[in-house]
Amino acid sequence: MNVSAHRAFSLLKELAFERVSGSQAEERAANRLLEEARAAGVDAHLEEFTVPCGEVKYARLVVTAPYRKEYEVTGYERAESTPAGGVDLPFYYAETLLPVHLERVKGKAVLINGRLRRADYEKLRKAGAAAILTFSGSTIDRRNETDCDIRKLRETMTEPFGHAVALNMRAADAAEMVRRGAQQVHIELESICCDRVSHNVCAVIEGTEKQEEIVSFGAHYDSVYFSTGVYDNMSGSVIIMELLRYFAAHRPARTVKFNWFGSEEQGLLGSKAWTAAHAEELDRHVLMINVDVAAATLGQNAAPVLATEAAVGYVDALMHEAGFACQVKLDIYSSDCIPFADKGVPAINLCRFGAPGANYIHDRRDSLKSAYIDEKSLDITLQQALFLACRVVNAASFPIAREISGEIRDKVDEYLFRKEAKK
């Protein structure tokens, strides 16, 4: 059996629906992937894990002075609720959170630019901000074609710094508030914290010669709100399904494991849960190959390598040998390769980034309706993954040292908030 981009893209179409962490839709996708793996004659099962989730019952923002207007907002999941009836607060726009801004945020509803990063959250909490406002999208978005993002206060924020009142709004509305000189706002937010269950789909094919050595393949299958996630990352999920079919028919020399991770979009929770649950076997893992984002018609191929410069040279040489134009570099990548590298397992992430203007991600445009991904382009990453996989899985002597460079270890520690990022 050979791999088939057509078959992979057909499965992608079937699973092109919103699959948010801990939802019934995510579980439905997990069961479909499980069914597909078993149909290939491979031993596969689900592994469940708990995800910190939240539900927003009600969110409201009204400017009360010097003009009055209510704006569309979404509450952050796992945010702090306001008292019944809401709160009235002074409004302040803190552009960059420099000290001159932080001296003025105490007791106020504070609007910041862009996404709420952990470092900014820490600054605002310590400075005494009463509420946090963020915005998403662009100032020229059409309301009937876009959504007001639903975001979450992750545990990496709330565990060290506590829960805060937090709302998200549209960029155009945030700009109007600043332009019209908003001074006072009324905020109401009812948000609850809860735990839900997510799943990893796990499959294994035992090696014929070097069973003790394991090569892992991974891809996340969940999406964010409003997104069908066909680019990010059902494309990667169907690619590793094709690799599973291939190795089911062509038994590998080394043991190969395939994991479709849930809840990646919530902070790599599926791969973190998997590496924790399988800690005793990680010493046997010699490489992890992750596929996250593929199939963009207009785009470019990349392969961040979380290992050593020697590993970069090996992967780069393979790409040249096979005739693949691919930017191979020593770097981390924000995906499920991180928890493996953190445990000392070298990792490679294969991806095809969409070109500017053709790379819709994390919103409703990540959809087949946008016509920016296609079967032929998915085959590019599929063939890269197959070539790389066959070479390393069947190598007489494993060609990549089980080593993580100091540079990558530092970047992983920064990513996981164990150390402060270098300025």
Image (cartoon, rainbow, N blue to C red):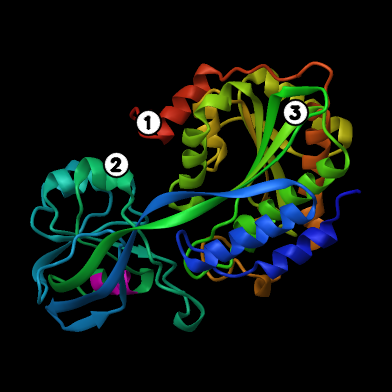
Mark nearer the N terminus (2 vs 1): 2
Tell me which amino acid carries mark 3: Val
How far apart in space, not on screen, are marks 2 and 3 (Cα)?
Answer: 35 Å
User: Which quarter of the figure has residue 8?
Assistant: bottom right
Q: Tell me, yes or no, whether the two marked residues, 2 and 1, touch with CB atoms within 8 Å.
A: yes
Dot in front, 3 or 1:
3
Lower sequence index among marks 2 and 3: 2
Q: Percent from the top left, x then y, of residue 153?
A: 31, 54
Predominant SS of the magenta segment? helix
Q: Residue at x 24, y 68 (%)?
A: 178
Q: Who is closer to the viewer here, 133 or 357?
A: 133
Q: Secondary structure at mark 1?
A: loop
Measured as percent of width and height from the top left, residue 60 is found at 23, 76
Tell me which residue sits at (65%, 19%) in the image. Answer: 309
Q: Residue at x 88, y 39 (%)?
A: 250
Q: Is residue 356 visible?
A: no
Magenta span covers which residues?
Answer: 173-177
Count of numbered marks: 3
Provide the secondary structure element on which disc 2 rests: helix
Vertical comparison of 303 with 11: above or below: above
**Residue 315: assigned label:** 3
Tell me the tag on residue 119: 2
Compute the Cα span from label 3 to label 1.
28 Å
Q: Amino acid at mark 2?
A: Ala
CB within 8 Å, label 2 to label 3: no
Reading the image, the residue beneath label 1 is: 421
Q: Above or below — where is 60 with respect to 384?
A: below
